Amino acid sequence: MFYIRFDVIYDINWEKGVLSNSMAKQMTEQVTIKFYWDVGSTNSYFAFHLLRPIAQEFGAVIEYMPFNLGYVFRHHQYVLSEEPKAKLKNRATDLQRWAKKYKLPFNVPEQFPIKTSDALKGSLVMRRLGMEEAYIDKLFSTYWEDNDASIKSLDGLIPLAIELGVTEREFVESLRSEEISEQLISLTQIALANDIFGAPTMVIEDEIYWGKDRFDFIRDHLLVLSR
């Protein structure tokens, strides 16, 4: 399904945690990183930007797994707003640290949380058209950078699809189809069945890495696979 080709031999620099082309290694590996995400998840925004360079470095393929995080939260009886106020205050400060460190134009949107079902369905529509990642990128930038909560409704999603060259009719008809709705429900149930409890979650070889601060471990895992 998804394959990484190693047609040259790699030397692993463990101190820097990078691969170099100084040695040769012949192997073919199937390496897929499943990325469970929801556009309403702040940390999914950061993970989306941090995961792609690592995947590119190792030649890994990202399999995007949109799922209804609100449904999962309700399933586990978790309510974000009920966390201690001091923790929520610190979280806001910490998010700005992350944005500064990785030079991302992150802004906390005025409307939070928002409904994301249509936005997630839209990603499944764009997957069929070969523009899934570009659409997800626009989703995250619109909400988490431009402070535009219009993506909570179809009216706000249509312009994104049109920018990517998809007609309004094609996008809307596909998004409203029973097949797309069932696919999102199925992906959410798959997440629950595989012990996915939050977003972002990255999965490599059934190993779960939850949160935007797990990329050191993800890199270590990919380094082992590249030996």
Image: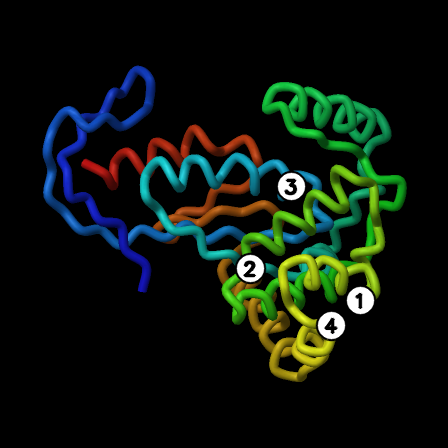
- At which x and y percent is residue 138? 67, 49
Q: Secondary structure at mark 3?
A: helix
What amino acid is found at the position of numbered circle 2 in the picture? Answer: Glu
Q: Secondary structure at mark 4?
A: helix
Q: Residues within 10 Å of mark 4 (few under 14, many from 20)?
A: some
Q: CA distance from mark 2 to mark 4?
A: 16 Å
- At which x and y percent is residue 76? 69, 56
Q: Are the residues at dot 2 and dot 1 in contact (C-beta closer than 8 Å)?
A: no
Q: Are the residues at dot 2 and dot 4 in contact (C-beta closer than 8 Å)?
A: no
For marks 4 and 3, give the one nearer the viewer: 4
Q: Which mark is residue 154?
A: 1
The quarter of the picture where residue 213 lies is: top right
Q: Residues within 10 Å of mark 3 (few under 14, many from 20)?
A: many
Q: Please tell me which residue lies in front, 52 or 183.
A: 52
- At which x and y percent is residue 183? 58, 74
What residue would you read off at disc 4? 168
Q: Earlier in the sequence, mark 2 or mark 4?
A: 2
Q: Are the residues at dot 4 and dot 3 in contact (C-beta closer than 8 Å)?
A: no
Q: Residue at x 44, y 51 (%)?
A: 62
What amino acid is found at the position of numbered circle 4 in the picture? Answer: Glu
Q: Residue at x 12, y 28 (%)?
A: 23
What residue would you read off at disc 3? 45
Q: CA distance from mark 4 to mark 3?
A: 26 Å
Asked if residue 113 lies left or right of residue 144, the reply is right
Q: Secondary structure at mark 2?
A: helix
What amino acid is found at the position of numbered circle 3 in the picture? Answer: Tyr
For marks 4 and 1, give the one nearer the viewer: 4
Q: Residue at x 22, y 49 (%)?
A: 5
Q: Residue at x 18, y 31 (%)?
A: 10
Q: CA distance from mark 3 to mark 1?
A: 20 Å
